[in-house]
Image (cartoon, grey):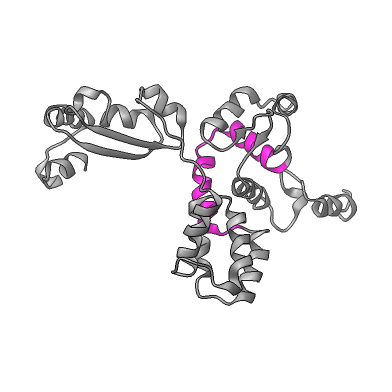
Amino acid sequence: MLLSQILGMGKDDINIYNVFDGTSMIRRRLSCKKVLIVIDDVNNPEQLEKLASKRDWFGMGSRIIITSRTKSLLTCHGVDGVYEVEKLNHTEAGQLFISKAFKKHQYLESFRELSKCVVLYASGLPLALKVLGYFLYGREVHIWEDALQRLKRDCKKEILDVLQISFDGLEELEKNIFLDIACFFKGMDRYYVTRILESCGFFPNIGIDILIDKSLIIILHDNTLWMHDLLQQMGQQIVKRECPEEPGKCSRLWMKADIHHVLTETQRP
């Protein structure tokens, strides 16, 4: 695909029978061409080794842009610079949302406060703003009000499915650490949480570092563990799906109502 798009040839006209043939042809055919290549959503260093291992594979002035959820994958490959995509600020988030929810460039007055609540809920995440904007477009005020109440409990599936891609790529120990932070430890001191997780045999020093590398959590200036509200909601939804009918059979309990139910209503064996 890379060679056919750059060289303007059909894929059937390029004879590649294995990975070695493909990398050799990239070096041979593109080393004298000034190209712009975007390698999107890289999750394995071998992908970069095969598609863009060295600078001399491409002509002078070429630009190779790589996107990945894993920062260390980029730094290990020796890229010239890493840009971390930031959340939209409040003004940018509002503009994106109203462009999807109203197909205009300004709020409808009767929806102003509700729109602000949606923007606050999305916390600068473009995906959430787009999905919610499309979902609410053309609906009446009372429908918006009902939808906002539901979102506080259950996020839209389209949003969670995309966010969960990073979670699904974790090892089991890192998954457990992420879920513990989402359910219990968000906003708490990193070293205090580390001591608790160590007692569970989770190897939290490397585990937390991996979660930071994959942008699933951050460490605030006061050493506090933090994650995006929607990532927290995703983690909690993963735990709830373990047994929706009976909270006591889930791996974690954090809601007062569920804890009270388990302690008072569950029959003893």
Q: Is residue 5 positioned above or below 70 on the image?
A: below
Taking the magenta stretch, the answer to whether it contains residue 160 is yes
The residue drawn where x is 64% and y is 59% is 154
In this rendering, would 127 be left or right of 116?
left
Depth check: give the residue in front, 103 or 2: 103
The residue drawn where x is 16% and y is 28% is 59
In this rendering, would 120 be left or right of 20?
right
Q: Is residue 85 positioned above or below 255 on the image?
A: above
The residue drawn where x is 12% and y is 31% is 29
Give the magenta range: 155-183
Quadrant containing the N terminus is top left
Residue 73: name its quadrant: top left
Residue 157: name its quadrant: bottom right
The residue drawn where x is 56% and y is 31% is 212
Depth check: give the residue in front, 47 or 266: 47
Q: Main secondary structure of the magenta part?
A: helix
Residue 27: name its quadrant: top left
Depth check: give the residue in front, 136 or 181: 136
Residue 60 pos. (x, y %):
18, 27
Residue 193 pos. (x, y %):
72, 29
Q: Is residue 203 visible?
A: no
Q: Is residue 260 visible?
A: yes
Number of marks in picture? 0
Residue 76 pos. (x, y %):
40, 22
Residue 79 pos. (x, y %):
35, 25
